[in-house]
């Protein structure tokens, strides 16, 4: 048993100091990011921020949102219509009337169109679509292939995640969790948020900006209508396929009333949010809050051509399929515009933020909402810590009473296990949740179980007549296989929980995996080292204190 222990002591001390440093360093970095950080933080301030706390401990809001991918498919279908029209114009191919797009594709009537030329046009201009002809041969159905549809839906979900992340970052929320779940669902966890309604409005607003020409049928035709039916009557009972009735509103600034009106707009957008470069809060001509937007080079070029060709006509600024304003074009405009409409400073700021962060590719639906107050989170922390301390204390007392000096060995190993667990979680920036605290307590139980296995093996060897030093070595050696087997099995189960579980389950799994990995090190390596330090330097060992 007289083994060299110098490198083993050095390794144990290095792990201990490294874990303490990781926790301290993470706490100091987290403290710097707080808007209310004290100018001269104390050690207690740093230690309080060593771990990133989850929603259930810090308070905040959790949203499970769904991306309506059908909206993204419809938008792609409209882009496909615009593209095939442009290509048909370049090639001189006559196209029949095209019906408005739906979630799967669109329909082209063969009125005056050559089927052979149309087939060649679709094949080359829209390679990701399939086409079919109805029984009468009077119209073509053009829709996306299954692979293309899946790609569009996947891209919509990924773009939604990035857009939400941009908006959350602009809000200044510390340590948010934004994760995609399944095909079209997104989990958003925002710890520390104190205004859930504002966050929901900013995150859930699609933010689709379109600049579309108002259809003006003549000098005496009205610009707006009182209802969709009234608008349809102006077109003989049915609005043409290339036009769309869009809701808007008028506001009485003094009475603060809002009346719904309807505009007839061109379906094709002159400029969209994709051409947007920046947006900021400004002032309109009456010094009221407004939102100024700025276009990139491509958008500015399109905007310049459209405004130059339509001087004297009205251009509708449409946000989320609702007309905000429709000013008259008085001259060529290149790269800037303004959205007005009785905004409060807060509303204008929120709209500018949404436009800056980009439009969501499709409408978002909130499937589930959970709000946790900061006081409830604080109570959870107190109760969780209290439960952990009571559990550890009971384990310590029982272990020392039953195993005496060997029990003290186990207690020291458990303390080091806890320090390593906290240090690793802080270093890897894992989030501690309430289930994570439960995983921490379970780790203590598993770690004690490892020491119990070893101590009972040692007892068996002593009862079998083995010398104390030999009994210690054999006890660790023969218990090692069982410890590895139980730990690997539990870690494997925890990894499955992490892979397929949601936020709270992941928190439990992370704590359990890290804690069990640390348990193997402390129960086998460190505990054996302490036995060697106590008994290895004695000339002759008559007995060991193991109960």
Image (tube, helix red, strand yellow):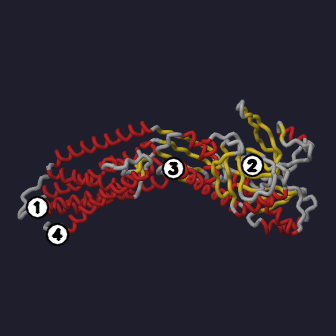
Secondary structure category for the residue under label 1: loop
533 relative position to 305: left or right = left
Q: Is residue 216 visible?
A: yes
Residue 354 drawn at (x, y percent): 62, 49
Q: Of 307 and 57, which appears nearest the observer?
A: 307
Q: Quadrant of the N terminus?
A: bottom left
508 relative position to 234: left or right = left
Q: Is residue 363 visible?
A: no
Q: Which residue is mark 2?
A: 317
- Residue at 15 percent across and 62 percent down: it is 532
Residue 33 drawn at (x, y percent): 43, 52
Of the image marks 3 and 4, the number of the one nearer the N terminus: 4
Corner quadrant of residue 381: top left
Of the image marks 2 and 3, the number of the one nearer the N terminus: 3
> In whole angstroms, how far apart are the C-alphas of marks 1 and 2?
90 Å
> In whole angstroms, how far apart are the C-alphas of marks 2 and 4?
79 Å
- Residue at 20 percent across and 47 percent down: it is 399
Q: Which residue is mark 1?
A: 467
Q: Which residue is mark 3?
A: 172
Pair 1/2: label in front: 2
- Note whether 258 is above or below 118 in the view shown: above
Mark 1 Cα-neighbour bin, 10 Å: few <14, some 14–19, many ≥20: some
Pair 3/4: label in front: 3
Of the image marks 1 and 2, the number of the one nearer the N terminus: 2
> In whole angstroms, how far apart are the C-alphas of marks 3 and 4?
54 Å
- Residue at 17 percent across and 69 percent down: it is 4
């Amino acid at each position: 048993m007289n083994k060299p222990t110098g490198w083993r002591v050095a390794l144990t001390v290095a792990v201990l100091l490294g874990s303490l440093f990781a926790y301290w360093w993470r706490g100091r970095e987290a403290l710097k990011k707080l808007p209310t950080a004290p100018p001269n933080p104390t050690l207690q301030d740093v230690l309080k921020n060593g771990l990133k706390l989850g929603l259930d401990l810090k308070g905040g809001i959790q949203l499970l949102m769904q991306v309506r991918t059908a909206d993204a498919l419809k938008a792609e279908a409209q882009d496909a219509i615009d593209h095939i029209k442009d290509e048909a114009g370049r090639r001189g191919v006559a196209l029949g009337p095209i019906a408005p797009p739906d979630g799967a594709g669109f329909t082209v009537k063969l009125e005056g169109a050559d089927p052979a030329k149309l087939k060649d046009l679709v094949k080359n201009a829209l390679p990701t679509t399939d086409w079919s002809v109805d029984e009468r041969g009077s119209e073509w159905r053009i829709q996306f292939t299954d692979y293309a549809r899946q790609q569009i839906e996947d891209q919509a979900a990924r773009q939604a995640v990035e857009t939400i992340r941009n908006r959350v970052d602009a809000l200044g929320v510390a340590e948010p969790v934004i994760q995609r779940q399944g095909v079209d669902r997104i989990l958003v966890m925002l710890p520390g948020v104190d205004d859930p309604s504002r966050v929901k409005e900013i995150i859930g607003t699609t933010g689709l900006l379109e600049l579309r020409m108002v259809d003006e049928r003549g000098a005496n035709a009205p610009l707006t209508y009182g209802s969709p039916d009234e608008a349809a009557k102006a077109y003989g009972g049915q609005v043409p396929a290339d036009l769309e009735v869009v809701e808007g509103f008028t506001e009485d600034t003094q009475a603060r009333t809002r009346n719904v009106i309807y505009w007839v707009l061109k379906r094709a957008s002159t400029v969209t949010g994709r051409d947007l470069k920046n947006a900021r809060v400004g002032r309109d001509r009456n010094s009221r809050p407004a939102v100024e937007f700025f276009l990139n080079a491509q958008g500015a070029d399109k905007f310049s051509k459209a405004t130059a060709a339509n001087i004297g006509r009205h251009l509708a600024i449409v946000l989320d399929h609702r007309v905000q304003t429709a000013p008259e074009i008085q001259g060529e405009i290149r790269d800037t515009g303004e959205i007005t409409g009785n905004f409060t400073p807060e509303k204008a700021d929120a709209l500018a933020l949404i436009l800056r962060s980009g439009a969501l590719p499709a409408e978002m639906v909130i499937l589930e909402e959970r709000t946790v107050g900061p006081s409830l989170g604080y109570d959870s922390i107190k109760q969780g810590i209290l439960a952990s301390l009571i559990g550890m204390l009971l384990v310590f007392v029982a272990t020392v009473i039953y195993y005496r000096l060997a029990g003290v060995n186990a207690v020291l190993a458990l303390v080091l296990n806890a320090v390593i667990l906290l240090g690793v979680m802080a270093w890897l920036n894992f989030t501690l949740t309430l289930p994570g605290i439960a995983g921490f307590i379970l780790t203590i139980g598993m770690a004690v179980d490892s020491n119990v296995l070893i101590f009972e093996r040692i007892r068996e060897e002593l009862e079998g007549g083995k010398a104390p030093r030999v009994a210690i070595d054999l006890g660790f050696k023969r218990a090692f296989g069982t410890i590895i087997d139980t730990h690997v099995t539990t870690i494997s189960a925890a990894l499955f929980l992490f892979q397929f579980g949601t936020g709270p389950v992941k928190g439990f799994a992370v704590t359990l995996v890290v804690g069990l990995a640390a348990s193997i090190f402390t129960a086998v390596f460190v505990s054996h080292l302490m036995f060697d330090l106590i008994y290895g330097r004695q000339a002759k060992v008559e007995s060991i204190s193991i109960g």
